[in-house]
Amino acid sequence: MSRGKEILQMKNIRKRFGRHHVLNGVSLTCSEGSCIGIAGVNGSGKSTLLSVIAGIQKPDEGQIYIDGINILKNKKYIGKYIGYVPQENPLIEDLSVNDNLKLWYCDSPYNLKEELEKGFLRSLGINEFQKKAVKKLSGGMKKRVSIAAAVHNAPKLLLLDEPSAALDLIAKKTIRDYLKEYMSEGGTVIIVTHDQEELDMCNELYVISEGRLKHIQNNVRVEGLLREISGRGQV
Amino acid sequence: MKRFAVLTALEIKKSIKALPKLIPGAILMIIIVLVIALGAKGILSDKPQIDDKDKVSIGVVCYDDSKMMELAKRILTSTKSITESIHLTFMEEKRAEELLEENRLMAVIIIPDNVVSDIMTGKNTPIDIRFSRNAGYEAAAFKEIADAAVNFLASAQAGIYSVYDFYNENNQSNYIDDALDRLNERYIKTVLLRESFFENTQVVATGDLDVMEYYCVSGIVLFLFLFGINSVTFTEGYRREAIVSLCITGTGIGRQHISRLCGIFIVYAVFVTVIIAGVCAGGYIDIFMAFKLILSMVPVLLSVSSIILFIQVLVENKTGQVMIIFFAAVFQSFVTGGFIPELMLPKAVTGVGKFTPAYYMIEQIKAVYMGSGKVLFNTVTLAAITLVFMILSYVCTKAGRKV
């Protein structure tokens, strides 16, 4: 399935909260331009896995390499290589969209004004509501701004935690279109999702269960995925 | 570092944009504080005022038109302690008799001609005092005062007789008149202008400041805390996701808190500057004092901002934040004498007050206003308070949980 050179290597990642082993020896490899889908029941460790890759939580064991660099030992590279879109938006609610973007794009290789006029921020549709305060935006708008914030530094790896949850069809399509554009330029996506359209975008699919990743067939439908997640039947 | 600078600038911009929403709340709080200050002034410092109708009406019939008597009359009618409780009216004897008969005067004092000079020369010319038939207790009280005055004059006359005896025994009787004139002149001035011989020291329950100043100072601190309610109502804290994302990009929790502190501080700074400028424009303080007050308020505002930030970090829920700020404001105001002066509070309560940030905020404003040398000490203490609350905010955020 690999399309380019390996951008992410995770080896034997373990993470536990108290006695609960959330990640129990997770290993994963991603190639440039690929899209990895991860599914699993609530509390199975999907978000923990993303937050470990994003450097928010420190694993108890294991190693993570991005572009050959051990990011657990070189944390300053995390911000350079990884963009992270959490489930809840990471924006400052009192500020306008424009001000939030100014904050993220102050040291960006992109020109914020240009991107809003004719670049990827325009393709995300952010130019339409850039003057609004974040707290007045809909969920879909906030998600689009969150993605825009996450990619401010042109990251090689984009982590998305259920980006389409509670969004309408138009918002979902806008995000999907952007992700396709991002991958076509060599970006790698790891996406936690249960949305069929997003699953269809993925080159590889994994189910996380009992702290372990299980590789599954990539043309799976949601119904099959449900059976796989619940451990009842083959896909 | 660049993102930290941008974040700080955006926090300041956010606060300034929120200012118009904060104005009504600020005005309301200023009114509350002024009402407390003025109310307390009324309760603590004002003497009960006697209405004109409650004053004792005394008629004075004066046949002595000497210069000394004129002087005595002027002094009597302008002496505050007399005019506050007695209504003295100079009139003809016939009219005085009529008013006394109608019970419209409680007493009439009839001063015969040459009475002052007679007193000076030791001649006992009687002063006639007539009371109203219904004067009752007031008449008895007035009689006591009159007796005291007679005794007082008797002691003065004893001095006059002593002068006579002294000069006669030394065969210098030709000096007596001159000596008596000079002694009488001094005596009259000394006795009637007695206020000038006492040091006028005002003792108030509010310590070094007068009541109004004291309540304005503690009112400012109460306002600063209550204003925090306004700030947390109209501004959001950072979501955990925002904190984490900023951390990933190199703007750590400490820097985020410094930026937020600047945002809260700037709102306070604008309001306090406007208030002090208003007080200065009203002529209550000069421009130099206004400038000094604004500068000295910087550590005060930083410490109160750090406390508000800590409460925002500690409690995510806005209602909880408002309740904690309100409780902190009222509690600190009480134990530092913001409602009841410190001197009237039990020692245990004032002891607690000295461990509160509000105490040092009040001390700082007082020190600057009075020009005492404690400004540096208070500034250092307030800086330490700011640091402590910033560290607490950091620890609380770092722990990733709300205590």
Image (tube, coloured by chain):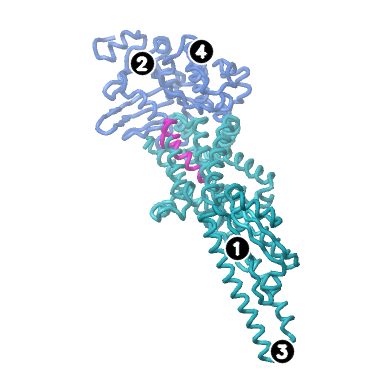
Chain colours: A blue, B cyan
* Image point (35%, 27%), residue name: A48
Real-space Cα distance between discs 3 and 2? Answer: 132 Å
Mark 1 or mark 4, which is nearer to you?
A: 1
Per the image, the residue denoted by label 3 is B172
For the N terminus of chain B, the quadrant is: top right
- Mark 4 or mark 2, which is nearer the start of the sequence? 4
> Callout 3 environment at 10 Å: few (<14), some (14 to 19), or many (20+)?
few
Residue pointed to by mark 1: B200
Q: Residue at 56%, 15% (x, y): give it.
A: A125
- Closest to the observer, B231 or A42: B231
Residue beneath label 2, please?
A205
Quadrant of res A200: top left
Residue carrying label 4: A174
Are dots 2 and 4 in contact, CB under 8 Å? no
Q: Where is residue B232 in the image (x, y as percent from the top left)?
A: 49, 33
Q: Is residue A12 left or right of residue B344?
A: left
Instruction: Judge whether residue B218 can be spotted in this image.
Output: yes
